[in-house]
Image (spheres, rainbow, N blue to C red):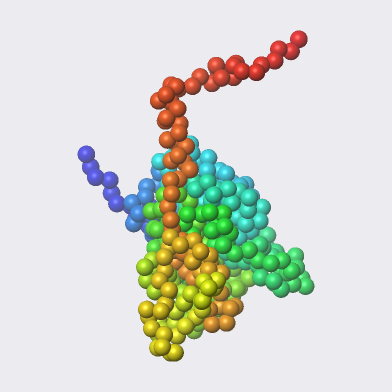
Amino acid sequence: MDTPAKLTRKDFVSDQEVRWCPGCGDYAILAAMQRTLPELGATRENTVFVSGIGCSSRFPYYMNTYGFHTIHGRAPAIATGVKLANPKLDVWMVTGDGDGLSIGGNHLLHVLRRNVDLQILLFNNRIYGLTKGQYSPTSLVGAKTPSTPLGSLDMPLNPCMFALGANARFVARGIDTSTSTLGELFTAAYRHRGTSFVEILQNCPVFNDGEWDNVTMRDVASENQLWVSHGQPLVFGKEKNRGLKLAPGGSHVDVVVIGEGGVTLADVWIHDQTNRTLAFLLSQLSPTMPGFPMAFGVLFNDPMPSYDATVTSQNADVIAKSGRGDIDKLLRSGHTWKVE
């Protein structure tokens, strides 16, 4: 029997014309995904992309795999159904800050708490791009858009905090421009059994250009990005001489400079991706807090049995004890009414 040829990036590129605005961060995310899947040993026939509505949700068209472009905000429900119907499939769900956190917020909450074995990519550009620039659940206070011409008054939602609060077992954050690290995050999410949630900071050059410049621009990136790694000190900065230290009482973290005031590397907090409290603290960090960076990488990873695995196991136990059911017998049993 011939050994199947190893798939390449080209095998995952569909024949559809990619229709995103020039300069959109979605191009980089798409390219990173198409490069990563062959490295994972994924196959086209066992891979499914499910999306809702929005610019990000064009994703399934551009992947040479199975896919569903579904209803606004309801991608989690469709993705859950796909995985339960065929647990052997690799299911990826693609959504945006509007689709996933506004109309789809309730659906997203429940797929996270259930821990269905699928990978969720949430593109966060802090704007509704497809419908021409209205403010979204992640837009900052004061954001001026066609729907908030005087400035938004809504407090923004933090996607990673939302996922952690919904009891997600895997939460990570990446950037559209850092394609090599995106591949690493996609790999980690894929290896995790259960719901994997990955927020990706994504630039919308037409309706919200430069929203993430305080994190992504080359002259500030090293000072404002903290890339975490399990078991490693939480250090950042061009010289890697700044770090996070737990404040007295443990209610928050402070930024310290290694080599100043007697501070050594041993004083810096070590990242523990199984610590949900630490993940909450990291998820809240932002350069808008003077001196603090934004945290990237796998913030939290603490696996437990996935929902689809437990459903499959429960069904198998019932069949073993009682045999396969008879749907016709079930419908004709129990409480029935006869209408004269």
Residue lying at the far left of the rendered structure: 1
Q: In which quarter of the image is the N terminus?
A: top left
Residue lying at the far top of the rendered structure: 340
**Left or right, residue 190 beside residue 251:** left
Residue lying at the far right of the rendered structure: 150
Residue lying at the far front of the rendered structure: 249
Number of residue marks: 0
Q: Which residue is drawn at 61% across and 18% down?
A: 334
Indicate the position of residue 228 as horizontal and vertical percent values. Answer: 43, 70
In the foreground, 217 or 16: 217
**Left or right, residue 126 beside residue 278:** right
Q: Is residue 173 visible?
A: no
Indicate the position of residue 161 as horizontal and vertical percent values. Answer: 56, 62
In the foreground, 139 or 227: 227
In the foreground, 285 or 262: 262
Q: In which quarter of the image is the C terminus?
A: top right
Q: Which residue is drawn at 68% across and 60% down?
A: 131
Q: Which residue is drawn at 58% across and 51% down?
A: 108
In the foreground, 137 or 12: 137
Q: Residue at x 71, y 66 (%)?
A: 154
Indicate the position of residue 96 as horizontal and vertical percent values. Answer: 58, 58
Q: Is residue 164 visible?
A: yes
**Left or right, residue 244 beside residue 105:** left
Give above or below for 77 relative to 143: above
Tell me where residue 32 sits by quadrant: bottom left
Indicate the position of residue 271 as horizontal and vertical percent values. Answer: 42, 69
